[in-house]
Image: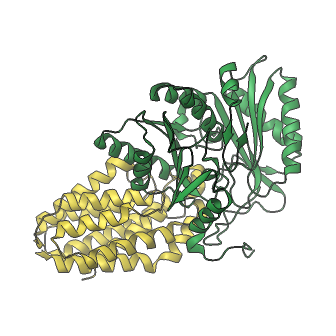
Chain colours: A green, B yellow
Amino acid sequence: MKMKKFINDPNTLTDELLEGLALAHADLVEVQGHLVISRGLEQADRVTIVTFGGSGHEPAQAGFVGEGMLDIQCVGDVFAAPNPQLVFDAVKMADKGHGVLLLVLNHAGDMLCGNMVMKMVAKAGLHVRKVVTQEDISNAPRSHSDDRRGLAGAIPLYHIAAAAAREGKTLDEVADIAQKYADSMATIAVAARCATHPATGTEFGDLGDVDMEIGMGQHGEGGGGRQPMKSAKETVEIMANALVKDIPLTKGDQVFVMINGSGATTLMEMLILYKDCVRYLESLGIQVVANMVGEILTVQEQAGFQLNIAKWDDETLRRWNTPAHTPAFFKE
Amino acid sequence: MLSKEALAQRLIHACQSVMAAQDELTDIDSQFGDADHGITMTKIANAIQEAVRQNDGSIQSMLDDAAMAVMVLNGGSAVPLWNTWLDGLQEHSVAANEMTVSQVKRMFAGACDALAALSKAKVGDKTMMDALIPATQAISAWEGDMDGLFLAAAEAAQQGAENSRNFVSRFGRARSYGQATIGTPDAGAVSMKYFFVGLAKK
């Protein structure tokens, strides 16, 4: 099938989307080249937070720059990590004398870039802690979490870490809070229809008319769980059950639940899935205390969703209920 | 001896060889990757070619310019990997206008070690190292003239990229597909092969 997208030039997709973001949210962010910078950064007197990643996943991650979330996001090209020099420049710009938390999603290119940046900041004498999110349970068991991909579970972590930074916590304290959060969550993805690469028009595989694939990554890479489509309730229960076992969760736990639409999943479907997930967790005696339902980290026009569940304590919930002013996440 | 001009010409041929393969690289990468390896390698090759053309210093300064030109590109994993390899070539080259066969051998060996330390991949992991390691070994083992050295490297890289068909992917996005990757060569090994094939052209 021929790609049908409203674009101008495959070579300027990222530049054009960033220009649009800057125009649409001039009060919240400033765009300098491939850096998206929070308007609040200039006044910040605290630990600051930087992350990086490819474009094509909007609103992630650039849409989460602003007060109460990211200070700077370094944007690569479509699905590709930016260059280490750009990330190093961002870290230098973000440092307000309290150090910088560098958040990395576990993908090959991002990890290589993150490791090179850490070498560069060490040479420059900057105070930086790196925290990697790696929570995709379809890749590998928890004992081999280095092999787990980083999916949408990183997004709520931005807000929790930023809230801790705004409390005046030190870099080590903020990094430990972020690491603890990363360790207490898990994600699993499912796709019903694959996306196309917006620059090349190449399809990421073909699930045909009847199948879905549980475990599909956020660039459309397969996860092995190909099977005929099931109902919302059956699908979300299979996925939630796998996450409950992995984290692991037991009766009486408080959790955050995210239904992240991959790009071509309707809000109607997401709400049905969320309802079925809450009811399922309730049946296990697990209480859902917070949520995100919507398009958070997309894969172009992939149909499907990521289910993220995180085990929360009262402190995390308190941090969650602090303000955030970003293009894609707004909380008073 | 290898003069700076001769190395520059070989590097330009290497870049053109990679750029000519853009569609093939995209096709391979669309099977188990995200279909951008062709675009990314064209960007990298173009940056190397421009840096080489514009440099008017020593061999070392030319390779340093090439590494820096790649460093500032956006292109996922390929950018830090190629930057590291080129930086390794630079570091183990000479601040002069010509190199002996033994100096060239040292340069490629040092660069391969630098990249191996970053990538952690070995032959058989279905990565660019499947072509680079055999090519580097062929250079190290070469006893003869400069032309023969580059021809031997190209032959080993071609064989290495071909062998990558039989391997199960252990790195990057393709890893998720496991056994299904058997039969398809690794896109990174194929682009490295084209680079060495071009280097063999005077």
- Locate the C terminus of chain A by quadrant: top right
Q: Residue at x 25, y 71 (%)?
A: B152
Q: Find residue A108 and report its horizontal and vertical position in percent.
A: 49, 50
Q: Residue furthest bottom?
A: B202
Q: Residue A209, image x and y in percent?
A: 83, 62
User: Left of A290 or right of it: where is A267?
Assistant: right
Camera-side residue: A42 or A254? A42
Could you say where residue B162 lies in the image, as x and y percent from the top left?
43, 67
Residue B120 visible from this viewpoint: no
A225 or A316: nearer the viewer: A316
Which quadrant would residue A8 be assigned to in this image?
A: bottom right
Position of the N terminus of chain A by quadrant: bottom right
Identity of the residue furthest to the front in this view: A43
| Image side of residue A235 versus residue A298, left or right | right
Query: Position of B130 compared to A103: left or right?
Result: left
The image shows residue A303, relative to residue A96, as above or below, that is: below
All told, the count of numbered labels is: 0
Residue at left offset 43%, top offset 77%? B19
Nearest the eye: A235 or B147 = A235
Which residue is depicted at the point 27% across and 79% down? B53
- Give the left or right position of residue B5, taking residue B174 as reference: left
Task: Look at the image and tell me whether residue B158 can be seen.
Answer: yes
Residue drawn 67% across and 53% down?
A: A59
Q: Quadrant of the rendered structure where residue A331 is?
A: top right
**Is B168 above or below relative to B24?**
above
Q: Locate residue B174: give its quadrant.
A: bottom right
Q: Position of residue A71 (x, y in %)?
A: 54, 44
A319 over A84 or under it: above or below: above
